[in-house]
Image: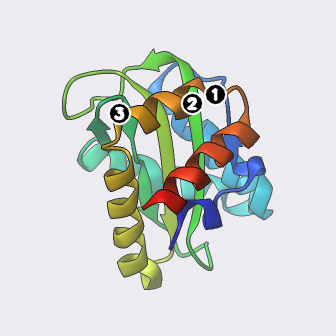
Amino acid sequence: MRLSDLLTSARVRVPLDSVDKDRTLAELVGLVVSSEGLEAEGAEIYRAVCERESVLSTGIGEGVAIPHAKCDALEGLVMAAGVSREPVEFGALDGRPVQLFFLILGPEAAAGAQVRLLSRVGRLMRDQSLRERLMAAGDAERFLQILEGAERAI
């Protein structure tokens, strides 16, 4: 499964408005909630993301975080992404702040697919040039173009 198959311009924000961890998570969840018509489930989804984040930071290092959670309010996998112009303290594994975010959500029944998607994001984000190009994207459309190009190349 490709990231570009799950991301739409409605679920990508460049730049993110938030400058701290909690607000960034809320903003990313908000992209999913509004684009999927899940307003009634928004608090449940946000709570699931925060609970997962409290176990261990999803900041994987090199300025990237992949917050994720299982939530049965969702029918399938869904993603959101964003770029923060200001580094966000996220408790990342390398201690560095984060600017590039990929939120992955799905029901318990999609746990295996969610793990594969997490792995794919991690693999793609090892590429410093790709990270830099995504962080320099001026808008959601350009972000998606860069990501699609990178996925075609692998």
Residue 132 screen position, x and y as percent: 46, 28
Q: Which residue is mark 3?
A: 128
Residue at image coords 67%, 44%: 12
Q: Is residue 27 above or below residue 76?
A: above
Secondary structure found at label 2:
strand
Circle nearer the viewer, 2 or 1: 2
**Snapshot quadrant of residue 27:** top right
Q: Is residue 20 above or below residue 50?
A: above
Secondary structure found at label 3:
helix
Labels 3 and 1: the sequence-earlier one: 1
Mark 2 belongs to which amino acid? Answer: Val
User: Which sits in the foreground, 37 or 126?
Assistant: 126
Residue at image coords 40%, 47%: 66
Q: Is 82 placed left or right of 97 in the picture?
A: right
Mark 1 belongs to which amino acid? Answer: Leu
Q: Which residue is mark 1?
A: 16
User: Dot 1, crowdedness within 10 Å: few (<14), some or many (≥20)?
Assistant: many
Residue found at the far left of this picture: 94
Mark 3 belongs to which amino acid? Answer: Gln
Quadrant that contains the C terminus: bottom left
Labels 2 and 1: the sequence-earlier one: 1
Residue at image coords 24%, 45%: 56
User: Which sits in the foreground, 132 or 41?
Assistant: 132
Residue found at the far top of this picture: 86
Question: What numbered label is drawn on residue 83?
Answer: 2
User: Which sits in the foreground, 30 or 130?
Assistant: 130
Residue 138 screen position, x and y as percent: 70, 25
- From mark 3 to mark 2, how far is it between C-alphas? 15 Å
Labels 3 and 2: the sequence-earlier one: 2
Q: Are marks 2 and 1 in contact (CB under 8 Å)?
A: yes
